[in-house]
Amino acid sequence: MYFTQTFIPTLREVPADAVTASHRLMFRGGMIRKLANGLFAYLPLGLRAFRKVERIVREEMDAIGALEIKPTVVVPGELWKESGRWETMGEAMLRTKNRTGSDFVVSPTAEEAVTALVRDELASYRQLPLTLYQINTKYRDEIRPRYGVMRAREFVMKDAYSFHADEAGLDAAYTAMGQAYRRIFKRCGLSVLAVNADSGAMGGSSSEEFMVESDIGDNTLILCESCGYAANVEKAVCGDDFDPPPSLAEAEARAASAPALEKVPTPGVKSVEDLCAFFKTDGAKCVKTLIYKGINAESGILSGREVFFAVAIRGDTAVNEAKLAAAIGASEAVLADEADVARITGAPVGFAGPVGLTGIPLIADRAVTAVHDGITGALAADFHYVHAAYGRDFVPCLIADLRTVKAGDRCARCGGALYEKKGNELGHIFKLGDKYTRSMKARYLDERGQSQIPLMGTYGIGLDRTLASIIEEHHDDDGIIWPLETAPYQILLIPVSYTGAVKEAADTLASALEREGLEVLVDDREERPGVKFKDADLLGIPYRVVVGDRALRLDPPQVEVKRRGEKECLMVEINQAPRFLSNLFT
Amino acid sequence: MYFTQTFIPTLREVPADAVTASHRLMFRGGMIRKLANGLFAYLPLGLRAFRKVERIVREEMDAIGALEIKPTVVVPGELWKESGRWETMGEAMLRTKNRTGSDFVVSPTAEEAVTALVRDELASYRQLPLTLYQINTKYRDEIRPRYGVMRAREFVMKDAYSFHADEAGLDAAYTAMGQAYRRIFKRCGLSVLAVNADSGAMGGSSSEEFMVESDIGDNTLILCESCGYAANVEKAVCGDDFDPPPSLAEAEARAASAPALEKVPTPGVKSVEDLCAFFKTDGAKCVKTLIYKGINAESGILSGREVFFAVAIRGDTAVNEAKLAAAIGASEAVLADEADVARITGAPVGFAGPVGLTGIPLIADRAVTAVHDGITGALAADFHYVHAAYGRDFVPCLIADLRTVKAGDRCARCGGALYEKKGNELGHIFKLGDKYTRSMKARYLDERGQSQIPLMGTYGIGLDRTLASIIEEHHDDDGIIWPLETAPYQILLIPVSYTGAVKEAADTLASALEREGLEVLVDDREERPGVKFKDADLLGIPYRVVVGDRALRLDPPQVEVKRRGEKECLMVEINQAPRFLSNLFT
């Protein structure tokens, strides 16, 4: 391809909103243009790179026997009502009505559509396992789209869905998918961290996220120096920095020796900080109590579209709302507003406590069980209790791991020190069990003719952000440094000026390179060599081949070959160049 | 690929709504499934065939230098407001609002998005010509989606847009695109008719539709036996079955010799049929007058969002509303309702006429100019005029070709007899001129540094209906007969029973065929040979290779090769089969 016959509008300026390397370089390199906030068009060069990623993903999916399909992008709202997600997806899902008033959704993901498809075809266990995937347009109405295609509203996702007769089948597909993902990211030249996104830390993982480390990552990762434990903070399991939680009997016994509960006036003392100052103690001695509202809760403890409950947590720790929502089986857990707190606790915000709290369930973090002589709100304005003891003065209906792990905490697996990193999620594999197949009534007949609900897994990779992440990981101050397999072209051929003998030699060489199966971009623009070299660095095509007057006059004639990102050039005989370069790609 | 490892749910039954061969066979062959009315999912086999069509389209676009891009599917409503089509697209365009209340559109086409993209990048004439294309999801909210993917709501279109500094550039791109389209349809095995979709019949065509003949076609084509003239009835030009229209002076002179206008009581006589019976004459002597409403009219004659006007047409002809709308530069022309007719004409429906009509413009079909002693409504209930003459009794402000051409009419080009066919539009190429570039303010600087508006062309092909049309043209009672280049697989290998020596030979042969680069589907199901052969006919893979016990025991061992659609089988030595079959595809 000749530069003047394609459309690569390179730029020197950087748009003001391009704060990340990938956004900046994709924009400057003429790979993408913005159509609207969070909506990007790929121009020819960007699309070539995108297709390379797409091909890698497709090849690895095909290699594990996943079957490509193409459902629609616009899907009936009815399917989302069947699964229940019509209610729970919130505003991130773009909805519309057609001319007859029927609800439709611009797919943010396709569990519903694929389950509906499989449900209608599935008859016998003989058809299982079955893994279907698509590489297709998705839309999520991000509140703050940014970083170019890294966090756009419209994007392309590879989403796969597997269906199984039993856990063993699901396990096998899940494992194969995880391995395929590792191969995909490796071929893309990405250093990916597979993190546990699951609440069960000790084996039996049912969800794994594939993260790239990134300063602009929207995920916080918790990592262990010693054992390699890696988890999303939303799911990271707390190691106990106290003795294992006592049984209720032990707690009661221990509380017997504690001083009696005492109600103390604490005028204007509301926050844990205030409390620590007032009582000259530290947060570990306080039991902070927060009133929460669970949305769409479905568990033994709590169930309902909006249910209130109290959370007791040690004063020096913070509630992790993702873990909290998971613990009560809710789609979300949000702090109650002041009026609800006052109504429920009979006191203004700041004086809630677990002692004597009635009317709503009390849930406690595990660490609270270690408090047997604590300070907590007395459910009355300007009063706190001291000497409050778990097991004697309050008994939660659920004790769970609810607090946020932070750098410096002990690893739950090995006790090592944990540290934090920011990460961007590129992929996610997830065992769904029968969540969708049950609600959407998928069934098959097993060997004995019994009707059974298939198990399901879901597996996604964001192609646009995978592409952007490649650039994040492979660039320098001058531009992109494409890994070989995802480069939009393999060779950038630069005639120092596209005239006379140089033009002729460049054209001949370009044809010879293409005959070797190499993808060649010829910079035939009427630009000074300096401009061409600067754009060569910007575009980051792996091998730059310069055809110049002087080297052509050597006997035999030579061209200069340089690998992007390396300093050294190499002189290669022009007739040997096609073979030489083609060997670099095999 | 092994049958049991892919997902091809073939069926014997036909769904009730599948009335066309392509819908029936794609459904029965497990190529597609319905997600909702007008929304279809491609299953693995269907997607393979779809990708073949996609590849042909992409190769031919690349071959003429069109550059592939990927804008978004969801585009800002703002762009459509700029072009004015936000108002004119009507309910076929699926609209939505995002969480901030901004308008968005699920693209039905992309003139706006691509013009916006190019507008921001275009600076100099040196960047022109530029042809960009995408192969991407589109959505049109068809009122009556049917015939499977032939007329679905969501579909994939290849849409290309070219930008030019001058007419010559646009002409060249338009011609190249037309040639590419002919190559695409030829490679797809389709007999396509390129029809004039333009009002200027005599050369200078600026729009061409590529049609396949089809009983279920939603277009009526007008074709000439003699000269090959072919046009969509919406645009087909009328040949005059009367002397060329007289000048106004000639008409006046001629009318001078006609009897004087006379008002005659015609109680209850409303339709042209009634009139003919009452006056014992024929429709060619009547001037029918209809009151129309033009929507979004923009022309010298009429302009406004809703404007009323009268159309005079000879009683034996019918108004072609597409031609009428084009003649007055409106997006649509619809008949006025009864109340409006009464208000405007002062008479009930049935008594409108051109004589004495005031307050709204009068437009006449060319044939009306030949009426110099006609019968027409008198703008009063139960009265008509006789002896009405064009030029004396009424003078329209516009005379145009407004009537529908029908089978038996004379060809406007050669005078030959016209006939009709039904057709489905697969592609459309269109010279837009500056319609979008002007309204959306695209500019470039010409050689002299002057700001200019680029010219534009637009070129679409529907991939899904192209695929369905291939099946419409290539099938028999038993199933599909794929043309070689669009077949989902090239070889269907059938071991009569997938066990023992037959299994071993089939596996070995499958590998050998794949090493030759052939795409092979092995029917390894535990089914009777009869079932496999029936499915082989249904799926229509070009070559069926049967591995059977008896032929394997021959010396040397043989397999049976049969081309789908032909009766004869051929015995081929198993070792020679890979080379033999591969030669059939080169």
Image (cartoon, coloured by chain):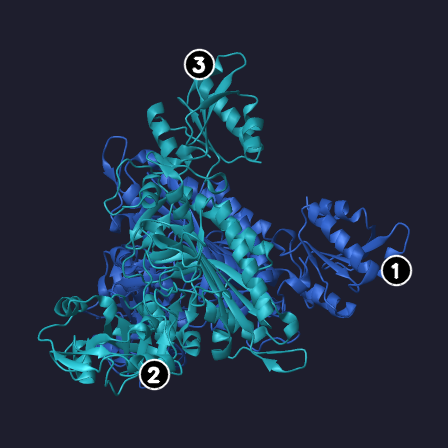
Chain colours: A blue, B cyan
Residue that protrudes farthest toward the left in the picture: B267
Q: Residue furthest right?
A: A555
Residue closest to the eye, B119 or B217: B217
Amino acid type, label 2 = Gly
The answer to the question of whether label 3 and label 1 lie on touching residues, with beta carbons closer than 8 A, is no
Task: List x then y, in percent, for residue B25.
Answer: 34, 41
Residue B524 appears in view: yes
- What residue type is disc 3 on? Arg
Mark 1 highlights which residue?
A550
Q: Quadrant of the C terminus of chain B?
A: top right
Q: CA distance from mark 3 to mark 1?
A: 71 Å
State the residue position of label 3.
Answer: B550
B259 sits to left or right of B518: left
Residue B547 vertical placement versus A382 (above, below)? above
Q: For the view shown, which residue lies furthest in the bottom direction?
A: B359
Q: Nearer the viewer, residue B151 or B416?
A: B416
Q: Quadrant of residue A271?
A: bottom left
Q: Which residue is mark 2?
A: B304
Chain holding disc 2: B
Q: Is residue B452 left or right of residue A505?
A: left
Name the element at disc 3.
Answer: helix
Q: Secondary structure at mark 2?
A: strand
Spot occupied by residue B290 in the image (x, y as percentages of width and height): 24, 75
* Badge 3 and badge 2 in a common chain: yes
Which residue sits at x=46%, y=71%?
Answer: B112
Query: In this rendering, do the residues under marks 1 and 2 share a single chain?
Result: no
Disc 1 crowd, CA 10 A, few/some/many (<14, 14-19, 20+): few
Please state the chain letter of the residue tagged with numbered disc 3 in the rendered image: B
- Cα gap from disc 3 to disc 2, whole angstroms: 80 Å
